[in-house]
Every structure is written in C-alpha cells, then in structure tokens.
Amino acid sequence: MPGPLEGVRVVELPAIGPVPFAAMLLADLGAEVVRIDKIPGSRPGLGDVMATSAMGRGRRSIALDIRKPKGAEVLLRLVESADVVLEGFRPGVAERLGIGPEQAHARNARLVYGRMTGWGQDGPLARTAGHDITYLALTGLLAGIGRAGEPPVPPVNYVADFGGGAMFLAVGVLAAVLHARATGEGQVVDTAMVDGAAYLGSMTRAFLNQGLWRDRPEANFLDGGSPNYRCYPCGDGRYVAIGAIEPQFWAALCTAIGEDSATAPSPYDPAQFAACTAMLERVFASRGRDEWAAVFEPLDACVAPVLSLEEALAHPHNVERGTYVPVGDAPMPGPAPRFSATPGRVGTVGSIGADTDAVLGEAGYTAEDVAALRAAAVV
C-alpha cells in the first residue's frame, strides 16, 4: 500500500547525521527519494557509511560530483521535477557550487529547499563548525543534564542532531510542501539544530519563567532531583527507571515494595528526599533488575528495567508491536508513527550509484549523454 507521502519527490544531497535521517523518515513514509552520493573513492567518509547502512534505506542512489559544473547542471535537472531538496552544507557552499536556492528556484518555482545546519543560515556562529554537544550547550539544556556538582552529560546526539535537527527539518519541509501545493510558491526552510533543540526545551523554559524550575541540574522533578524520577541500581548491578511522579503511581510503587505510602518518606517533600532516596536504594539493591521488572510489569507504577540496545530488541512489548524490523542484516527501528490507511514501509539498502543510469534517463539524458558524463567523472 502507498505511504502517506506517496507522490512527494525528494532530492537528498550528500550529508551525514540529520539530513540522511530526515530523508530516511520521508522515504519510510512513502516519499520517492533520490539520494545524491559522492562518486565512490573520490572523498571517502562517514557519508559513504551512512549511505550503505540501514540509514540509507528506501532511496535510489545516483553517484554525482556536484562540485563540477556539469554535475551541478545534472542536479538542477533533477530539481525540476522534485518537490523537496534537502541539503546540509555550511552557509554559502551550495551557492558557490551553483545549486543554491536561487538557482534551484529558477528551475522550479514550487520547490521546497530544506537547509540543515547547526547554527542556521545567519548569525555570528553560522559559518563555524559544531556538533550536537556544542549546539545543545548554547540552548541552556545541556547544563541541566547530569548529576549536581559534576560535568554535564552529553545525551549521545539524540537531542540537537536528530530531535532538534532532523525532525524539525522533516516537519518544516512537509509544511512548506502543503503551502507550495496550495499556492504554487516554493520557499527555503532554514533548519538550525540550535533552534530546534531550544524549541524542545519549551516546557522547561515555561516552568522556569513561572518559578517552577531551578536553573541547575538534579534540582527538579524531571532531572533526577526528585527521588521518584530517577534510576536506581539493582542487586545485579543493572538499573530500573522510576517515573512515579503522580501520587497514585507512587502509592502503587510503595505497595509493590512492601511500604505504606502514608508513612514512607515522601518524594514530594524536599526535606525527606534523602530518606526517600536511601529507602529506594536499599529496596532495589535487594533483588536483580529482571526480578523487579517482573514485579512491576503488571502495575501502574511507572517502573521499567533499563535495557541495553541489544536487550531492547527482545523485549516482549517491542517484539509484539514490531518496533524493530530487519533492514538488510541489521535490526532497526521500523517506521513511525503508524498510519491506519497508509502504513509506512521499510525500503532496501542499495549500493552507491546503483540507480545512476535510471535516474538520469528519467531526467531526459540519453545513453550517450550518460556515457559522456561518466567519461568526464561527473557520474
């Protein structure tokens, strides 16, 4: 069955991290995505690994040197029939290559030109390098992640790269596609990871503005500051995650561990936090993680085992829902969210340049044209 984005045509330019992730998401939801890959062996790097891994699934690949004028012209020909372009260069690079928004819109006025950078297209840091940790640092969010009195802990690259970057890029270009289809007008979508990460912190900042959040780590009810919202070591050295914020969940937790919530140290009174923490540390250390998981699984107590990446694949809930699916020979998260009438699909992983001839043929290039481009090392 066609996915919800059936009929949306996307051209994905070479990039790593958030851009391939956003393109994978669009492809999983049914968009037709053509990925522009570097010519194999020309400039090896992480992009090649992503293109040929499970994150490169569901797209056709053309190996194209867009640094050459003829390569830029090929790309602009492809853009003529596309709805969306995704690019992740530093500001000004696409323009220097002759494939920026102005050149692209001259070929296709309805085009949505999705740009992904760390700092955005303007501002004093726009042309400087960065990574998830540096973008997150400037939002104020990183300072609140970790233990009090210790350095902040980088949350892998889940927050700025993929949450604040890829997901906002996907939402942005889809919103712009709706606008383009209604008006015939394309536009540029300037997606900055620092902007998206800051947006993800909206609730925390709203609490801060109302005096309900302390601007330091491990001092609030969602950052490990409260004893009923943190992880505890079990007797086997593994962990359980406790999220019993509401009184009814806390009461269920207390009953399960043989305590009376009316007389046990309270997680709602800061003066009792130390005693409450000590009680929970003692209790959970008395059994292994999986023993506690079996106790809490049927209860509304918001307690779960902290699983490793490998363990998560075999958890019964994930197995029954099919949360992870095989992509090639690798287990990967399946398409999300789920649609009742137009379910997403998991495409196969191809090789770099496998579809060069077919894609160029669809753009009007003859076999002789393709041979000439190949002889010139353009494709």
Image (tube, rainbow, N blue to C red):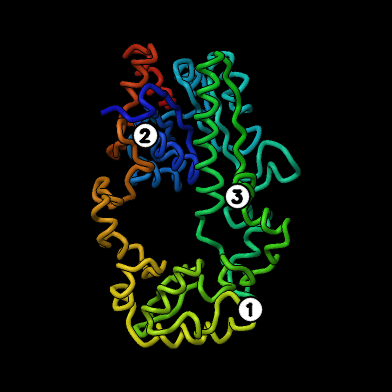
Q: Mark 1 points at which residue?
A: 270
Q: Nearest the camera: 26 or 20?
A: 26
> Which amino acid, by three-letter code, is at mark 3?
Ala
Question: Residue 29's mark?
Answer: 2
Q: Nearest the camera: 58 or 53?
A: 58
Residues tagged 1 and 2 counted as in contact (Cβ below 8 A): no
Q: In which quarter of the image is residue 236?
A: bottom left
Residue 234, horizontal then vertical, whole percent: 38, 81
> Which amino acid, by three-letter code, is at mark 1?
Pro
Residue 264, horizontal then vertical, whole percent: 50, 84
Q: Quadrant of residue 220?
A: bottom right
Seen at 63% across and 78% down, the residue is 270
Residues tagged 2 and 3 counted as in contact (Cβ below 8 A): no
- Give the secondary structure at mark 2: loop
Say whether residue 105 is left or right of residue 243: right
Q: How crowded is mark 3: few (under 14 residues within 10 Å), some or many (20 or more)?
A: many
Seen at 38% across and 42% down, the residue is 337
